[in-house]
Image (cartoon, rainbow, N blue to C red):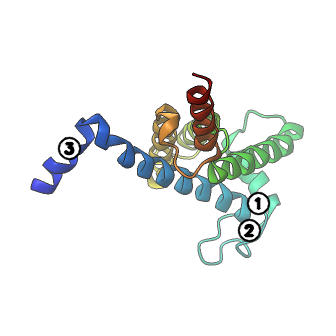
């Protein structure tokens, strides 16, 4: 338990907190990004045919059917559009989180996507489904990333731009 007390003390002291935040934000970005990109790869058939191994969809037609299941209130013509829009959104969010571009915007977009997905799963499939898939946990991680200080976004283009602005401010003094 002493390691837990030491970790808590480190989190409580501001000068020592940033390296821990930086590690946590990189981990959150990578795990969220890999989740989004893996889901896109699955529905495009890049992980293999449906229901082999841990492949969920295996092709886009299966994903469209799943979209219809999660959004039965949509007219048939909008189901295809929604499936493609979600796929593009997940691809963009996954890539921007991976690259560290617009991290805060990407994190809030991820939070919204995951929250809608979790609620749709809960209402139209079962509440066990988003809990078993840890969708609410991923949503919480995305929200925490969105609330994280930009200066803690290690290995990101956002952090590089903050560093440049701070250097320019120092030079202009």
Horizontal placement of 105 versus 123: left or right? right
Residue 120 in which image quadrant: top right
Q: How many marks?
A: 3
Find disc 1 in the rendering and name its residue: 62
The residue that appears at 46% across and 51% down in the rendered structure is: 134
Q: Is residue 50 above or below residue 92?
A: below
The residue lying toward the viewer, choosing from 37 and 132, is 37
Mark 3 or mark 1: whose residue is earlier in sequence: 3
Quickly name the residue at label 3.
Answer: 8
Mark 2 and mark 1: Cα distance apart in space? 7 Å
Residue annotated with mark 2: 58
Q: Which residue extends farthest left?
A: 2
Whichever of labels 2 and 3 marks the residue nearer the N terminus, that label is: 3
Q: What is the crowding at mark 1: few (fewer than 14 residues within 10 Å), some, or many (at least 20)? A: some
**In the image, residue 173 lies at what x, y percent?**
57, 22
Q: Which type of secondary structure does the marked residue at label 2 adopt? A: loop
Question: Up-down: is 100 above or below 3?
Answer: above
Of badges 3 and 1, nearer the viewer stands: 3
Q: Is the Cβ of the residue at disc 2 closer than 8 Å to that at disc 1?
A: yes
Measured as percent of width and height from the top left, residue 7 is found at: 21, 49
């Amino acid at each position: 338990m002493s390691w837990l007390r030491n970790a808590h003390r480190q989190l409580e002291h501001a000068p020592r907190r940033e390296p821990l935040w930086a590690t946590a934000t990189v981990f959150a970005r990578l795990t969220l990004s890999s989740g989004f990109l893996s889901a896109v790869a699955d529905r495009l058939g890049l992980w293999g045919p449906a229901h082999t191994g841990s492949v969920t969809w295996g092709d886009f037609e299966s994903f469209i059917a799943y979209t219809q299941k999660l959004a039965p209130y949509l007219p048939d013509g909008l189901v295809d559009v929604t499936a493609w829009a979600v796929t593009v959104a997940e691809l963009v969010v996954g890539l921007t989180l991976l690259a560290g571009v617009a991290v805060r915007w990407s994190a809030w977009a991820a939070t919204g996507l995951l929250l809608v997905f979790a609620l749709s799963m809960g209402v139209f499939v079962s509440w066990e489904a988003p809990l078993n898939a840890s969708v609410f946990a991923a949503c919480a991680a995305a929200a925490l990333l969105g609330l994280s200080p930009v200066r803690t976004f290690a290995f990101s283009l956002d952090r590089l731009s903050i560093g440049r602005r701070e250097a320019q401010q120092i030079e202009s003094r």
